[in-house]
Image (cartoon, rainbow, N blue to C red):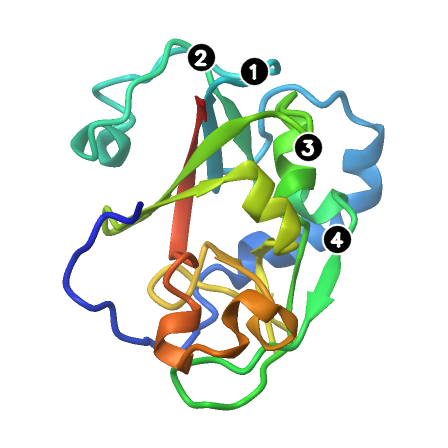
Amino acid sequence: MMTTMNKRTFVATGVGMASLWGAASSSQAAQKAAPKTAAHGPALLTLSGAIAQTNRGALDTTIDQMMGKHGIQFNAAYALDAAALQRMPQVTIRPTLEYDAKRHTLKGPLLTTVLAAAGVPANSPVQLVLRAVDGYTVNISLADAHAYRMLVATHIDGQPMALGGLGPQWAVYDADVLPAFQGKTLKERFALCPWGRYHIDVQKA
């Protein structure tokens, strides 16, 4: 079930966060040797709810202003910075996007890989609430996210996704190759794919 809001319109991807992704790439080798605890850079994605691994404490009503305004609550969570997402195995897809009806190259880790880092097995019977920076939310089962090979896309056409564009991440799949979406119009294919996504709430079914 999807929370509906005014139709979100496409904003061209900028390079405002390129420094974050660039720093992540240049420090990737060093980060591999570091303990996988708290994020070293700014957290770009936070997971909470039914997770087994955490690396930060409770929501801080002073610091976590956006999450607080979106009604998010947690006693502990798992935060990922750009370097952590870059360390994960990367997958590339080339879907036709609804915004210009052209194919674009999207790259990032699978959503199931990101969830596994927070201690959520791929076969867990959980629901995922994917929340974007404007409050737009989508509910999808982990089973469907796994079947659709949904990405946590961080790059488009070789460029990092910027906040103000499609970033910091876009939860997206290759609708061109999925039978469930091939009969739908382009605008209908990506209803489950919030861009500007920054938080995932893992809920027990």
Question: Badge 2 is on which residue?
Answer: 76
The dot on residue 26 is 4
Mark 4: give few (<14), some (14-19) or many (20+) Cα within 10 Å. Answer: few
Q: Specify which label sits upstream in the sequence, 2 or 4.
A: 4
Q: Is residue 50 visible to the viewer in this orientation of the structure? A: yes
The picture quadrant where one finds residue 75 is: top left
Q: On the rendered image, what quadrant is the C terminus found in?
A: top left
Q: Which mark is residue 37?
A: none
Q: Is residue 175 above or below residue 87?
A: below
In the picture, the disc for residue 122 is: 3
Residue under pointer 1: 54
The reply to whether residue 84 is in sight is no
- Residue type at mark 2 is Ala
Residue at the (52%, 90%) spot, across then down = 102
Q: Could you tell which of marks 3 and 1 lies nearer the N-terminus?
A: 1
Q: Which mark sits nearer the N-terminus, 1 or 2?
A: 1
In this view of the protein, which residue sits in the foreground, 84 or 129? Answer: 129
Q: Nearer the viewer, mark 3 or mark 2?
A: 3
Q: Position of residue 4 (x, y in %)?
A: 19, 54
- Residue type, label 3: Ala
Whole-number angstrom distance, CA of label 3 to CA of label 2: 21 Å
